[in-house]
Image (cartoon, helix red, strand yellow):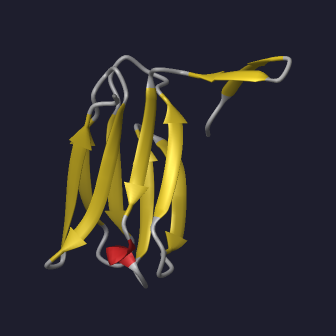
Amino acid sequence: LYKKRCKGTVCKTSADLYTIQVENSFAGDSISVYINDSLLLNCTMGSTALTLQVNRFAEENALMIVDNKSDEITPFSLNPKGSIVNVAKKDGKISIQESERE
């Protein structure tokens, strides 16, 4: 999912990187996380938050969070330059907030 370009012992990461932070508000929920049609995660969430890092792999990318129990899909258009994305569950609804990388 996350690739580093390395020369010797020096590694660089892509500026076009998505950091997806799934908060612990999903504890006990079965969810799937996709970017476009690529499945990144399919599991029942534990009590701790989870972070995924993925290099951008298309000009336009969509993040999709699926509640596996209800099959409800929450789509989100990602910044084409990469970003930090926080995913939380509040009052039974999935909330997605994106911020630019510094």
In the rendered view, tell whether residue 79 sits above or below residue 31.
above
Residue at (47, 81) in percent of width and height: 47
Classify the position of the C terminus by image quarter: top left
In the rendered view, tell whether residue 28 sits above or below residue 95.
below
Residue at (41, 48) in percent of width and height: 20
In the rendered view, tell whether residue 25 sits above or below residue 7.
below
Q: Residue furthest right?
A: 8
Residue at (24, 71) in percent of width and height: 89
Residue 17, position in %: x, y? 46, 29
In this orientation, which residue lies closer to the viewer: 89 or 8?
A: 8
Residue 62, position in %: x, y? 32, 37
Classify the position of the N terminus by image quarter: top right
> Residue 19 is drawn in which quadrant?
top left
Number of numbered discs overlaid on the protein picture? 0
In the rendered view, tell whether residue 86 sits above or below residue 101.
below
Q: Residue furthest bottom?
A: 28
> Residue 24 is drawn in which quadrant?
bottom left
> Residue 30 is drawn in which quadrant?
bottom left
From the viewer's perspective, tell me whether residue 58 is left or right of residue 39.
Answer: left
Residue 10, position in %: x, y? 75, 21
Residue at (71, 23) in percent of width and height: 11
From the viewer's perspective, tell me whether residue 71 is left or right of residue 10.
Answer: left
